[in-house]
Amino acid sequence: MAELKIFNSLTRQKEIFTPLTPGYIGMYVCGPTVYSDVHLGNCRTFISFDIIYRYLKYLGFKVRYVRNITDAGHLEGDRDEGDDKFSKKARLEQLEPMEIVQRYTLGFHKVMELFNNLPPTIEPTATGHISEQIEMIKHILSNGYAYIVDGTVYFDVEKYNKEKPYGILTNRKLEDLLEGTRELGGQDEKKGRLDFALWIKAKPEHLMQWPSPWGMGFPGWHIECSAMSGKYLGKEFDIHGGGMDLAATHHTNEIAQSQACFHVSPARYWIHTNMLTVNGARMSKSAGNGFLPGELFTGNHKLLEKAYSPMTVRFFMLQTHYRSTLDFSNEALQAAEKGLKRLWEAYEILDQIKLDTTEDNPNIIDPILDDKCKNLVAGFDEAMNDDFNTARVLANMFELVPIINSIKGGQIAPGSLRKDTLELMQKQLRIYLPGIFGLRDEKSNDSGILDGVIELLIQIRKDARNRKDFATSDKIRNELLIQGIALKDEKNGGTTWSLL
Ligand code: AMP
Ligand code: ZN
């Protein structure tokens, strides 16, 4: 088997991937914080890891893929201050925090399904692993890397750094990190500026709190991932992933916690996906520049010129390597929509090409073309083995498209290609497009009928609106929405539709 190379953020270089146990991979990816809807930036990270997961399985590995749900312990500030995001939302909406968690977990799953992401093999929650987190904190305390102040437990970064380099993941020295952090204030009870909370004392009115050896409280954000990855993948496992924004704090602290508890660095390979940006700025919940997937699928957003289907968005993301930033734009999405359509058309044409003869005819075979096609197809695995370069795979596919179209158009005789080359092309495109890239043909199956029926409903709705029968027109729109079909009234007076 060819070698898989992964860019390891820890060593800042591409390395040949060697699993700890032959044939088996443990992979942990930081999942969503479920106090609000996931935005498209979050989706980019989860789609990138879905492709990685699918590819590792394609290579024949048995993969245990753990992606957590953060449903407790996420404070507003990144310095252990401010309100708990779940409690705040619950109070605002007069709901139980677990109702917030349930709502956004279900919403997250729906979005993952729409994007055709495979579910992880384990999806543990922070609230389901409080005792594991407490155990780990107890160990860190007894190993001397943490201290208690009035019911809150802090990790002692400077003490830890005397033995292990705290900033190893981002290649930064403690002095530099300290310089970039503001001084402790008079109210601060921490010893060091970079110290972070493992366990936080809860005020009596705090909605989510648990008993612990240090009193009633709740876990800090970072400890949940250390406790859950340790539980399901072991103290040391193969791959840890997440967005690049997590490297400097969350993942840096995870490494420190695991070292302080188990004396090992948790993961061999750290994979960080780059950010989805809007006009160059990182898409984030707090910046308020987030697109919700539903806004894209319906086109209901001021920056959107039209609606885009889930597979268009997925394809748009695959066109850029996961370690490059990807800027959101209407033009790029429209190009992706066209590109994907061309690719599916070629895929269908290719699937239907059959060589009449069972034997290759050496008189017709075009060896140069045949070689070219073989190399382009072989390039799929080569590109993926080179740090999961989906963009290069797609570039190869687009070189195959005109060849396939010319076979259909008759400019190239099907017999120009060897039978096994043609079959290899058919097989690899099947493996890659719906398989590794997880692209669903949105217009397949009964879509012809569906198209007709929806067009008819759009027409009936239009007639209803013309006679001011808004009850009927709303009913059609709402019932279709329940069936997962969104209608959008365009500025030109027409109506378009998309699958949610
Ligand atoms: P959160 O729910 O904010 O904790 O984020 C869930 C995942 O999405 C994490 O792995 C983040 O690193 C990732 N993420 C957040 N914002 C972006 C973005 N703009 N682009 C790509 N990934 C992101
Ligand atoms: Zn995490």
Image (tube, rainbow, N blue to C red):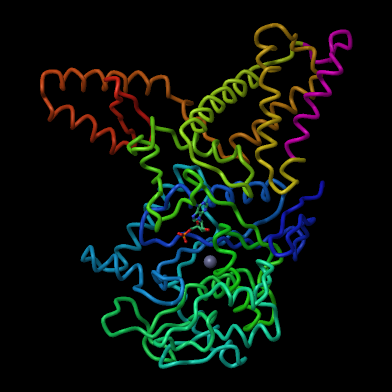
Left-right relation of 93 to 146: left
Residue at the spot 78% in from the left edge and 12% down from the top edge: 415
Instruction: Using the image as rendered, state which of residue 33 and residue 83 is in the foreground.
Output: 83
The percent coordinates of residue 64 (x first, y second) are 62, 60
The percent coordinates of residue 163 (x first, y second) are 71, 85
Instruction: Using the image as rendered, state which of residue 437 and residue 170 is in the foreground.
Output: 170
Residue at the spot 65% in from the left edge and 66% down from the top edge: 170
Left-right relation of 471 to 342: left
Q: Quadrant of residue 232?
A: bottom right
Taking the magenta stretch, the answer to whether it contains residue 185 is: no
Left-right relation of 397 to 287: right
The percent coordinates of residue 183 (x first, y second) are 49, 81
Taking the magenta stretch, the answer to whether it contains residue 366 is: yes
For this orientation, the residue located farthest to the right is 362
The kind of secondary structure the magenta stretch mainly shows is helix
- Identify the image quadrant of the C terminus: top left
Tally the marks. 0
For this orientation, the residue located farthest to the left is 468
Residue at the spot 38% in from the left edge and 84% down from the top edge: 217
Residue at the spot 56% in from the left edge and 26% down from the top edge: 339
Q: Does 41 appear above or below 416? A: below
Q: Does 141 appear above or below 28? A: below
- Tell me which segment is drawn in magenta: 357-381
Q: Quadrant of residue 307?
A: top left
For this orientation, the residue located farthest to the top is 410
The percent coordinates of residue 318 (x first, y second) are 59, 39
Q: Does 273 appear above or below 116? A: below
